[in-house]
Amino acid sequence: MKKFLLALTALSVALMCGCSHIEEYEEDIETTEDEVEIQTVNVSNKDYYSRFKGQDISINVYNWGEYIPDGSEEGILNVNEEFTKLTGIKVNYSTYATNEELYAKLKGGASTYDIIIPSDYMISRMIKENMLEPIDMSEIPNFSNIMEKFRDPEYDPGSKYSVPYTWGTVGIIYDKTVVDEEDIGWDILWDEDYAGSILMFDNPRDAFAIAENLLGYSLNTEDSEELRKAAEKLKEQKKVIQAYVMDEIFDKMGAGEAIIAPYYAGDAVMLMDEFEDLDFVIPESGTNLFIDAVCIPKGCRNKEAAEMYINFLCEPDVAYAVADYIGYSTPNQATFEMLDDEVKEDGISYPDDDFIEEKTTVFCNLSDEANLEMQTLWTEMKSSEEQTPNRVIVPAFMAICVIASLVILIRRYIKKKKDIF
């Protein structure tokens, strides 16, 4: 009887423990499921999106790299796929790395696009050169979600050709385990203590803006002498630069191949989320505030479908998915209200209003003459890269070897002549 009672007690204990483990396992499952938030899209008017269904329509979208949620990660919305499900319109999607690359592609006329997302100054230039279609704002009811301060911008008076997509500032991303300095400013990009570990933007407008800030010039200067001095400043920087890059900044900084680089705030936020040794600062001396906006290029094939796509991007849920995925700031008021306070107050994505008012500058389109001069100075500066010390060592060594070989051959020839005679 004692043995039976002992066995019964042991069985009861085992069952209780088993149940406890089952409950813990179920709790673990629930916790894991809760960690992955599945993004969804609720649109303001489903009927609006139904008129092109079954018509086999497609649009060509040309955007920056890594600049829209693509469903590549669990729980992340695939914006283009959701648009197709909702409207029946297929999206052909391709990317570019700089505004200048986008401009050259459109100017060349080799490809036709229905949607592009250039930056402020490039939008202004394209308007001037008649490269954009006016947008029928009656077809964009969700434009009402755009914050007042982003409407009627200087680069597009009356918001006739563009609808804001994202905005942000430019700052410096750095490895805080190596760079231990207070009040980091733009001059750190010239610091010889970090030579060989500094990256620089590979586009003239952003690069010149940094040099202009250091020299105390306007970021929109057209003064020929100031542009020349900015180019000289950039030339001085070359001796410490590891590489001129754009999208590669993410990989190089993440892999520890570089320790300092200028970077866009949104990209910096995403990079810091992945690598805890990195930090970001917006220099107190000021910086560029940029706005990327959705436009329809001249000669697009499906303007009404393109306008529907723009309206879809302005849906609060879609704009939230974009801001959450790429880390850039949203101009959509309804979306902003959905963000966590931690994001709104991080000082990077949404800097203080006073700082924005007093310390930031939005690029304006420069005159044709100033654009040409800047591009010429940039090309000359980049091409002179061959003359930097590191580039000269190998050719100089080879030249010395050739000269030495010639001297040896001549001496042998002379000795041979002496032996004969």
Image (cartoon, rainbow, N blue to C red):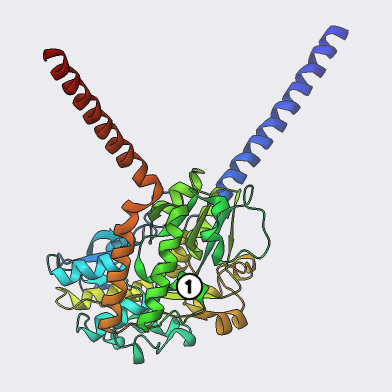
Amino acid at the residue labelled 1: Thr
Residue 261 appears left or right of 139: right
Q: Residue furthest right?
A: 2
Residue 353 picture location, percent across and down: 60, 81
Disc tally is: 1
Badge 1 element: loop
Specify the quadrant that holds the C terminus. top left
Q: Could you tell me if residue 99 is visible in this image?
A: yes
Q: Quadrant of residue 54?
A: bottom left
- Looking at the image, which is closer to me, 237 or 289? 237
Residue at x 45%, y 60% (from the top left corner)? 237
Q: Quadrant of residue 299?
A: bottom left
Q: Could you tell me if residue 76 is visible in this image?
A: no
Residue beneath disc 1: 330
Residue 107 picture location, percent across and down: 17, 72
- Looking at the image, which is closer to me, 43 or 332? 332
Q: Residue furthest bottom?
A: 158
Residue 396 appears left or right of 189: left
Relative to 406, is 378 above or below? below
- Looking at the image, which is closer to me, 375 or 345? 375
Relative to 151, is 254 above or below? above
Residue at x 27%, y 62% (from the top left corner)? 84
Residue 144 appears left or right of 359: left
Relative to 293, is 188 above or below? above
Residue at x 62%, y 66% (from the top left corner)? 346
Residue 412 picture location, percent across and down: 20, 20
- Determine crowd level at label 1: few under 14, some 14-19, many 20+ residues with C-alpha closer than 10 A: many
Residue at x 17%, y 74% (from the top left corner)? 302
Specify the quadrant that holds the N terminus. top right
